[in-house]
Image: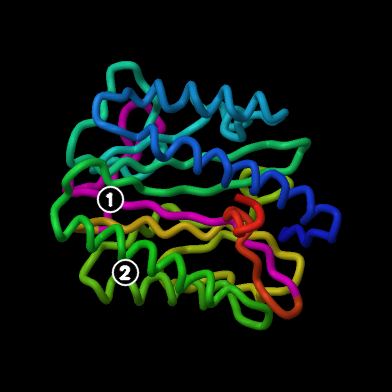
Amino acid sequence: MIRIKNENQIDGIRKSCKMLARLYKEVIPLVQVGVTTQDIDAFCVDYIKRGGGTPAWYSQDFPGAACISINNEVIHGIPSKKRIIRDGDLVSLDIGIDLNGYFSDSAVTVPVGTITPREQELVDTTIRALDAGIAACRKGNRIGDISRAVYDVASGAGFGVVYEYCGHGVGLAVHEDPQIPNVPERGPNPRIVPGMVLAIEPMVNLGTGDIKLQKDGWTVITADGKTSCHMEHTVAVFEDHTEILTILNPNEE
């Protein structure tokens, strides 16, 4: 069942999303050569708790506040003292906050040092795919329009699009209906209506879109070992516009 949010609920979700956007502003500069993924996670835990929130993934029993996935890890990389960031890495951060029962969700992939031109194209294309998905997320369209927009941008640039994991509703829980595939597919295709709050999240790979789940039960990697990129925003749909909740406007910096 899709949970349509009222104005007060969207305002609560918005506050959680703005807190998350401010966290990203602080944590992205820390993603540097020599830093461990545990160091980054510890910063996120402290920041969220100081702000009166709780790491959203704790409710899913994930062992960290941030999923930190590097290179061929697509999503759900577990923070570790042994995982040291190196020059040329693509580091994906996926973080959510539970603030007074309202959930935010956002992801960004951070290039560290010198990456290849094709990897830079992967990052740029995933951003464009996210932008296209958000542009398609408006009253009157369908969820499948988001899927088509994401897929057309990513596949059109010759990249593989992950199809086994997808975007989703969010706001009153970490994951809600509807699912938002990153590839066009048959199945439920609900109309987009005001009050929907959605997490749109392209996961795009340098090679195949196929993935594998690691033995830890969390970490998802590319099937061919090539690099992956993950970008995500939480958005709210209104009568006359769609608002990206997980960004800071100039007056909110």
Front position in the image: 242 or 152: 242
Image color mode: rainbow
Q: Could you tell me if residue 168 is visible in this image?
A: no
Q: Please, what is the three-letter code of the amino acid marked with disc 1?
A: Ser
Q: Which stretch is magenta?
A: 209-238
Farthest-out residue, left: 116
Provide residue 37's location: percent of width, then percent of height. Answer: 36, 26
Q: Secondary structure at mark 2?
A: helix
Left/right of residue 173 with respect to residue 142 in the rendered view: right
At 65% from the left and 48% from the top, the residue drawn is: 18
Q: Are marks 1 and 2 in contact (CB under 8 Å)?
A: no
Residue sitting at the far bottom: 140
Judge from the rendering whether residue 100 lies leftward or rightward of residue 53; answer left or right. Answer: right
User: Reading the chain from its start, which is encountered first: label 1 or label 2?
Assistant: 2
Q: Which residue is mark 2?
A: 154
- All told, the count of numbered labels is 2
Q: Position of residue 228 (x, y in %)?
A: 28, 50
**Residue 146 — which label?**
none
Q: Badge 1: few (under 14), some or many (20 or more) residues near its Cα, within 10 Å?
A: many
Q: Which residue is mark 1?
A: 228
Tell me how far mark 1 sits from mark 2, CA to CA. 12 Å
Residue 223 included in the magenta stretch of the image: yes
The image position of residue 223, as x and y in percent, is 22, 47
Q: Residues within 10 Å of mark 2 (few under 14, many from 20)?
A: many
Q: Residue at point 72% right, 60% down?
A: 2
- The amino acid at mark 2 is Ala
In the rendered image, which quarter contains the N terminus?
bottom right
Residue 237 appears in view: yes
Q: Determine the residue positioned at 57% across, 46% down.
A: 21
Query: Residue at (51%, 72%) from the top-left corner?
Result: 146
Secondary-structure class at tag 1: strand
Residue 234, placed above or below residue 26: below
